[in-house]
Image (cartoon, rainbow, N blue to C red):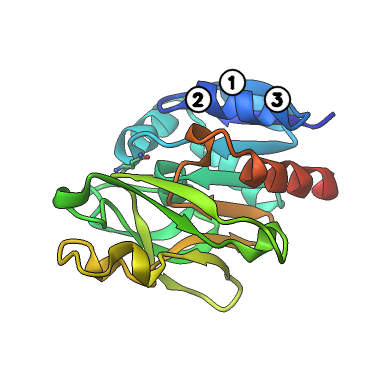
């Protein structure tokens, strides 16, 4: 059984622990640098990326995590976790840093104040050619503004989700799920819907990397 850490300095840790265990993984709430060597994979949850960044630096987690990411550790980041995996951040705090690893630029709180949170069905063909759509829940979410060649785009905001709503129209077609090598990221929160397919995909990535 793979041991998957859930970064537990801040954010919605418990929902990810439950989803991963439901898919047959063992989990560890990761807080200390000594724990980084033990894990076969890592989830960086939603929460607040500026706070997560500060706490990761304070706890000495940044260097060991960056080392393991460079060595191919599978990591799944959701929402704030997606920001943590981005090589570049727009609308970040002045001194905000990330772990990085995915050649992309994300925009924090991109969906705007008017749309603190919204929900839409979107298709995610990586889950299977005939897979049912995923219910994507966005909570003060980032979107991906730019990706490099090695980044696979896994999902975009469908036009019909935002059509006719001026506050949301800029979100049409925006990239909201990506993969680069062993790194997976979504702007949305699959852990809150009870749909375990994204976690299943990640557990499979961890198993095949092991
Ligand atoms: N707005 C948060 C951030 O910038 C992300 C929100 C979330 O993870 N639900 O980190």
Left or right of 209 on screen, residue 46 = left
**Cβ–Cβ below 8 Å for labels 1 and 2?**
yes
Q: CA distance from mark 1 to mark 2?
A: 8 Å
- Which residue sits at x=62%, y=55%? 132
Upstream in sequence: badge 1 or badge 2: 2
Q: Is mark 3 within 8 Å of ligand 1?
A: no
Image spot of residue 133 (x, y percent): 56, 56
Residue 21, labelled with which disc?
3
Q: Is mark 1 within 8 Å of ligand 1?
A: no
Work out which quarter of the rendered image holds the N terminus and state it: top right
Work out which quarter of the rendered image holds the C terminus and state it: top right
Nearer to us in this view, 186 or 96: 186
Question: Which of pointers 3 and 1 indicates the residue nearer the eye?
Answer: 3
One can see residue 132 in this view: yes
Image spot of residue 94 (x, y percent): 20, 50
Nearer to us in this view, 190 or 163: 163
Q: Which residue is mark 2?
A: 13
Q: In the structure shown, which secondary structural element does the residue marked by tag 3 occupy?
A: helix
For residue 141, above or below residue 173: above
Q: Residues within 10 Å of mark 2 (few under 14, many from 20)?
A: many
Q: In the structure shown, which secondary structural element does the residue marked by tag 2 occupy?
A: helix
Q: Quadrant of residue 128?
A: bottom right
Q: Quadrant of residue 89?
A: bottom left
Image spot of residue 155 (x, y percent): 52, 64
């Amino acid at each position: 059984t793979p041991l998957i850490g859930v970064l537990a300095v801040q954010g919605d840790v418990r929902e990810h622990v439950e989803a991963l265990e439901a898919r047959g993984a063992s989990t560890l709430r990761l807080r200390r640098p000594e724990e980084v060597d033990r894990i076969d994979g890592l989830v960086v949850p939603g929460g607040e990326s500026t706070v997560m960044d500060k706490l990761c630096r304070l706890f000495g987690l940044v260097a060991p995590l960056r080392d393991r990411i460079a060595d191919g550790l599978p990591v799944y980041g959701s929402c704030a976790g997606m920001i943590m995996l981005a090589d570049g951040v727009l609308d970040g705090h002045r001194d905000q840093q990330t772990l990085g690893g995915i050649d992309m630029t994300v925009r924090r709180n991109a969906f705007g104040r008017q749309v603190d949170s919204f929900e839409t069905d979107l298709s995610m063909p990586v889950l299977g050619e005939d897979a049912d759509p995923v219910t994507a829940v966005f909570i003060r979410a980032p979107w991906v503004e730019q990706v490099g060649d090695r980044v696979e785009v896994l999902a975009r905001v469908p036009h019909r989700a935002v059509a006719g709503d001026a506050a949301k129209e800029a979100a049409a077609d925006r990239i909201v799920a990506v993969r680069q090598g062993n790194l997976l990221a979504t702007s949305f929160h699959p852990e809150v819907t009870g749909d375990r397919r994204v976690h299943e995909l990640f557990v499979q990535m961890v198993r095949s990397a092991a």
